Image: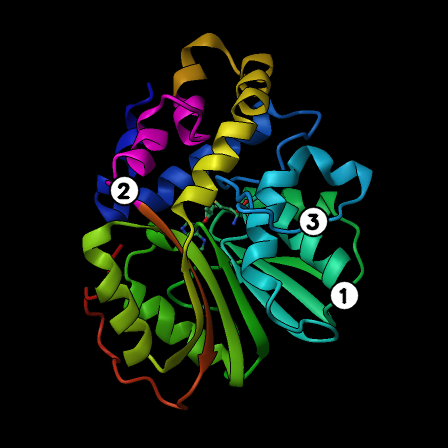
Amino acid sequence: MSLIPDMYAELPRPIRKPLWQIWHKVMIRYDKDITANYMNYGYQGLNGDPVLELQEKDEKDRYCIQLYDHVVNRSDLLNKKVLEVGSGRGGGASYIARYYNPKSYTGLDISASIIDFCNDYYDVKGLSFKKGIAENLPFDPDSFDAVVNVESARCYSSLTIFFNEVQRVLRDDGKFLFTDMIRPREVANVKRTLETCGFKTIHETEITANVVEALNRDTHRRETLIRKKVPGFLVSSFDTFAGAKGTERYNSFINGTYQYWSFVLEKTADKPGIHSRGRSGEL
Ligand SMILES: C[S@@+](CC[C@H](N)C(=O)[O-])C[C@H]1O[C@@H](n2cnc3c(N)ncnc32)[C@H](O)[C@@H]1O
């Protein structure tokens, strides 16, 4: 059963969209008391980085929150209009809306069931959720000051189309705050595609070691939660999906199959250089 999460990135892209809808329904079914609001591998500062101050209720999600914080903390989001593409179970959207006080924060996801869940569950000023796909964002040009994207882009049918969509919905000088796992041989291509699509890099970091350290520290919590909530035949799938230590996903960061990167980018051009549904820059 762990095969699907293991092989996810190798599955044909058209299969990935329905898989997400099914996966969210499975999670809603098994996480009845709602303890899993994040679906990323997390981030841990190294070399004496300052400790992020969190409210008591957020402590259990520290590592997943730290990934969100790492990607947004160089940008001023106060009173800004922010879009998150691939907001999943909405934990990161809630964190940013509560701690960074944007004017509005819209979480967008491909799954109708997770959007309904998020709109029912969260009651945070300025925070709302909308169904849509990354490759065809349901917003007018120049609608947002910043777009956040955390561990979601590798699922999309085309990075080029997604980056062009982000460029379209951002205002001039708007920020694109993007983090995901990328195969080492694709990193240069992804950076080139970002540039061709009209983004200037303000900051970029390879954070694989930070993600691995977060998984080292968070594996026990993840495994305990999974064993408490899901039936035995699903445990190995969920362990792999969660990147628990010893799974194929965790090992892919250790053995160099994947790196994890984060980018702070700024919109530089009104019109992106690429309009076609090209396949360049795929993760
Ligand atoms: C690994 S989860 C990360 C969720 C969230 N960013 C987090 O860190 O908790 C990836 C999310 O991307 C969403 N997704 C996948 N393909 C998408 C697409 N084409 N358009 C919008 N969302 C998509 C999935 O439904 C899922 O919620």
Q: Is residue 42 visible?
A: yes
Instruction: Tell me what residue is drawn at x 49 percent, y 32 percent.
Output: 215
Callout 2: helix, strand or loop? helix
Which residue is labeled 3 in the image? 52
Instruction: Tell me what residue is drawn at x 42 percent, y 87 percent.
Output: 268
Residue 101 is tagged as 1
**Relative to 57, is 100 above or below?**
below
Q: Residue 207's spot in the image, x, y percent?
A: 42, 50
Label located before the other in sequence (3 or 2) = 2
Does the segment drawn in magenta span residue 252? yes
Residue 211 is tagged as none
- Amino acid on which the number 2 mark rests in the picture: Ala
Instruction: Tell me what residue is drawn at x 58 percent, y 31 percent.
Output: 28
Instruction: Tell me what residue is drawn at x 28 percent, y 80 percent.
Output: 196
Q: Please give the range of residues in magenta.
A: 237-258
Q: Residue 57's spot in the image, x, y percent?
A: 79, 37
Count residues near mark 1 (Cα–Cα under 10 Å), then give few for <14, some for 14-19, many for 20+.
some
Of residues 76 and 94, the one drawn nearer to the viewer in this rendering: 76
**Lateral position of residue 9 relative to residue 45, left or right:** left
Callout 3: helix, strand or loop? loop
Residue, far top: 232
Cα–Cα span, label 3 and label 1: 17 Å
Q: Is mark 3 within 8 Å of ligand 1?
A: no
Q: Nearer the viewer, mark 3 or mark 1?
A: 3
Does the segment drawn in magenta span residue 2? no
Which residue is labeled 2 in the image? 9
Contact check, label 3 and label 2, Cβ < 8 Å: no
Residue 257's image quarter? top left
- Amino acid on which the number 3 mark rests in the picture: Leu
Count residues near mark 3 (Cα–Cα under 10 Å), then give few for <14, some for 14-19, many for 20+.
few
Quarter of the image where the C terminus is located:
bottom left
